[in-house]
Image (cartoon, helix red, strand yellow):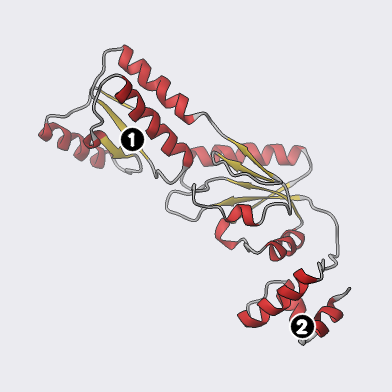
Amino acid sequence: MNIYEIAKLANVSPSTVSKVINGKDEISDATKKLVLEVIREYDFHPRISTNISDKIGVFFRKSEYSVFTSPYMNTLLIGLSDYFFDWGYDLLLMPSNKIPVDKQRFLVFCHKQRMGGGVFLDLHAEDDYVQKIDGIIPMVTINAQFAGEQMYSVSSDDYSGACKAMQLLLDMGHRRIGFAYIDPHYQAHSQRLKGYKDMLTKNGIAVDNDLLFDASITSERQFQMIVENWERMGKLPTAII
């Protein structure tokens, strides 16, 4: 089957099929849906000018605290790029909201980008769209776990790490311990917070939400205001995670 047969079955022009395959915006949603349904029904795979997949896509969330502001993410990118280069791959950095979540369109997207694999840096627990495009290329999630045919994950044991940090402080005699959190939608951060709370409960210490604070503060003055608030409440912590 070729593009002309797909066009005939969908009752559109071959150029329209080509535009749908290549993700052009000037095609109406209704026409896109029709063409993609025919493509899926007949399991059509467009011919690509090259079979070389020499790029690994690295997908990041567009937010205020992204790969461009996080020291952790910057270090991670350096490690990925070094490793990819050693194996003959280029790193293709792109925002995750640009990925087509339709499986057939994602297939075309990967071919167009010559992408042989993907790495997701900062998925939320709710980002299950990755499971909808699973099976096209191998994909790795960092510090987020999703099941799939070609879905793999690399995660730190954040829960145990937080428990060990808490145990160290508790063994030193601390009982009023502050905790700096980030967005709990990230699985890694939610696991750290759980470890912190579980260790307090295990040791008969009530969880005090006044001792939790947002770690995304950007100035010394902001932290000073948090400390001043603790002092006013008589809750200045003796240690902070």
Q: Please say whether residue 27 is visible from this viewpoint.
A: no
Question: Pointer 1: residues within 10 angstroms few (<14), some, or many (20+)?
Answer: some
Q: Amino acid at mark 1?
A: Ala
Q: Quadrant of the N terminus?
A: bottom right
Residue 10's tag is 2
Residue 204 location, quadrant: top left
Of 132 and 77, the residue lying toward us: 132
The residue that label 1 is drawn on is 180
Residue 105 location, quadrant: bottom right
Residue 40 location, quadrant: bottom right
Say what secondary structure mark 1 lies in. strand
Q: Residue at x 49, y 47 (%)?
A: 125
Of 59 and 201, the residue lying toward us: 201
**Residue 222 location, x and y as percent?**
25, 42
Q: How many marks?
A: 2
**Residue 139 location, x and y as percent?**
67, 46
Horizontal placement of 55 versus 160: left or right?
Answer: right
Say what secondary structure mark 2 lies in. helix
Q: Residue at x 12, y 29 (%)?
A: 234
Q: Please say whether residue 136 is visible from this viewpoint.
A: yes
Of 218 and 106, the residue lying toward us: 106
Dot 1 or dot 2: first in sequence order is: 2
**Residue 212 location, x and y as percent?**
28, 36
**Residue 203 location, x and y as percent?**
29, 19
Horizontal placement of 3 versus 145: left or right?
Answer: right
Q: Residue at x 61, y 79 (%)?
A: 29
Q: Nearer the viewer, mark 1 or mark 2?
A: 2
Q: Amino acid at mark 2?
A: Ala
How far, Cα to Cα, is label 1 from label 2? 56 Å
Question: Pointer 2: residues within 10 angstroms few (<14), some, or many (20+)?
Answer: some
Horizontal placement of 204 versus 1: left or right?
Answer: left
